[in-house]
Image (spheres, rainbow, N blue to C red):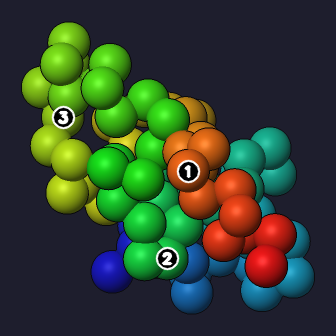
Amino acid sequence: MKRCVRCGRTKDQHEPETLTCPGSVKTTFASMELPDGRCCNDCSHVVRCCGIFGAKPGNTECDWFPIRFQLHPRFAAEVKA
Ligand SMILES: [Zn+2]
């Protein structure tokens, strides 16, 4: 279940249109999960994160916030297609 890193609630518990966090008008739903079907191994930063920060290539959540996921250039052709 994806939970908001700002308020800890699930996405469903946010305002339907704006995804504003309940009790706050300033923050909106935010998750550290990577895009569907992606893992750290698909990210340009995988070497640095796994080598220096101990992340695992199979992780589906970024250790950073806001997430720094950047699709590795090797997927460029796939994305355009
Ligand atoms: Zn929230």
In the image, 48 versus 60, the foreground residue is 48
Neighbour class for label 1 at 10 Å: few (<14), some, many (≥20)?
Answer: few
In the image, 81 versus 23, the foreground residue is 81
Residue 79 appears at what percent x and percent y?
72, 69
* Mark 3: amino acid: Ala
Residue 4 visible (yes or no): no
Q: Which residue is mark 2?
A: 36
Q: Which numbered mark, 1 or 2, is in the foreground of this view?
A: 1
Q: Quadrant of the N terminus?
A: bottom left
Q: Earlier in the sequence, mark 1 or mark 2?
A: 2
Q: Which residue is mark 1?
A: 74
In the depicted structure, whether residue 5 falls above or below residue 2: above
**From the viewer's perspective, is 80 left or right of 39?**
right
Local SS, label 1: helix
- How many numbered badges does the structure rendering display? 3
Which label was assigned to residue 55? 3
* Mark 2: amino acid: Asp
* Mark 1: amino acid: Arg
Name the residue at 54% across, 67% down.
35
Which residue appears farthest toward the right when viewing the image?
Answer: 17
Name the residue at 77% across, 86% down.
16
Tag 2–tag 3 contact (CB < 8 Å): no
